[in-house]
């Protein structure tokens, strides 16, 4: 359970520095505690020894993409149930279905609306 | 500048002309394709991967903040979206982000009485490329005149010419993304 005094911890995974900066500003200004990784591989390594409440990931990334990240997290004991939202410019149904099959919790198409995004974050952690 | 790619006579007899209007981002590997756009204060980014020979162009105009918000920068979300859309489309065609090279055009301040929105667009584009580690090998930005850009995505060749300002299409910032975008779908 999250009270006012314990901010929701979010990990954002995106290889674009500009997108990371945008997400950091949007989420910290709305009271979230934000950690950031540059690709799926870095996220996987960080998550091996850290916990968050919810993960937001891009799809197209070097080394390990968003699909691969979700698949690997779903097989780990620590993160099998972790809410994972995909935030992407991809609009194809095929990619969306792939994310769903991999175990994603939700799908958000960029450009994102910060209020809709934060509402979704609060919804999926409960 | 020495890095300007020469715009050679087209080897292919058949040219597929594609106009990129404000708010669009398109990529191609087809040597017949020639993209073109006319820019006033808008900025166009031409990206090219010389190994996979994938190229693409976008065309954007940042929105000014509302009049009552004085200390806020121009709204860069839409520019960021069009940059990412362009890059992702190119990655889907085999481009690699670390190989991309950029050329920037436009960002003119056509009306000296209005706020320098061209300069703001140019600054956003430069900052984006710096942040993303994409080398900008050529830029023809700002000034006071409109430009016509022709870009061959499969070879990376670009030609930019100054044109009379009344040739440039009317440019209005697109509003914040509409409700269809940013939609949250929970599975």
Image (cartoon, rainbow, N blue to C red):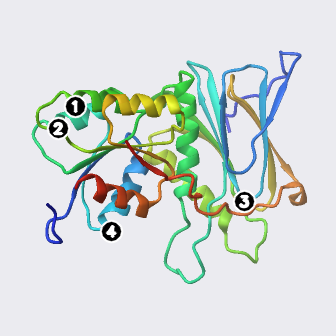
Q: Is residue B163 above or below residue B45?
A: below
- Give the foreground label among 2 and 3: 2
Q: Which residue is mark 4?
A: A29
Closer to us: B117 or A112: A112
Q: CA distance from mark 1 to mark 4?
A: 30 Å
Q: CA distance from mark 3 to mark 4?
A: 31 Å
Q: Which residue is mark 1?
A: A74
Q: Residue at x 78, y 29 (%)?
A: B34
SS at circle 1: helix
Both marks 3 and 4 on one chain: no
SS at circle 2: loop
SS at circle 4: loop
Which chain letter matches label 3? B
Q: Are the residues flagged by discs 1 and 2 in contact, CB closer than 8 Å?
A: yes
**Farthest residue toward the top?**
B12
Q: CA distance from mark 3 to mark 1?
A: 47 Å
Indicate the position of residue A31 as horizontal and vertical percent values.
27, 67
Q: Residues within 10 Å of mark 3 (few under 14, many from 20)?
A: many
């Amino acid at each position: 359970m999250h009270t006012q005094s314990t901010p929701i911890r979010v990990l954002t995974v995106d290889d674009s520095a500009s997108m990371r900066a945008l997400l950091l500003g949007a989420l910290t200004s709305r009271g979230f505690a934000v950690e950031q990784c540059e690709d799926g591989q870095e996220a996987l390594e960080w998550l091996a020894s850290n916990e968050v409440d919810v993960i937001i990931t891009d799809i197209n990334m070097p080394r390990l993409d968003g699909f691969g990240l979700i698949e690997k997290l779903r097989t780990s004991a620590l993160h099998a149930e972790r809410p994972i939202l995909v935030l992407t410019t991809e609009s194809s149904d095929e990619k969306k279905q792939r994310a769903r099959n991999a175990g994603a919790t939700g799908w958000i198409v960029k450009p994102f609306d910060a209020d809709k995004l934060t509402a979704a974050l609060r919804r999926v952690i409960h | 500048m020495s890095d300007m790619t020469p715009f050679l006579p087209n080897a292919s007899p058949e040219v597929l002309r594609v106009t990129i209007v404000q708010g669009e981002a398109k990529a191609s590997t087809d040597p017949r394709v020639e993209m073109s756009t006319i820019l006033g204060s808008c900025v166009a980014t031409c990206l090219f991967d010389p190994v996979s020979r994938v190229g693409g162009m976008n065309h954007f105009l940042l929105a000014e903040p509302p009049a009552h918000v004085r200390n806020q920068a121009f709204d860069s979300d839409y520019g960021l979206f069009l940059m990412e859309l362009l890059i992702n489309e190119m990655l889907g065609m085999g481009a690699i982000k670390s190989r991309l090279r950029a050329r920037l055009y436009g960002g003119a301040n056509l009306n000296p009485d209005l706020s320098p929105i061209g300069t703001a667009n140019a600054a956003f584009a430069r900052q984006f490329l710096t942040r993303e580690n994409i080398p900008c090998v050529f830029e023809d930005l700002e000034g006071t005149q409109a430009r016509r850009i022709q870009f061959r995505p499969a070879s990376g060749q670009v030609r930019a010419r100054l044109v009379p300002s009344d040739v440039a299409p009317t440019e209005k910032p697109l509003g914040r993304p509409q409700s269809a975008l940013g939609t949250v779908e929970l599975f």
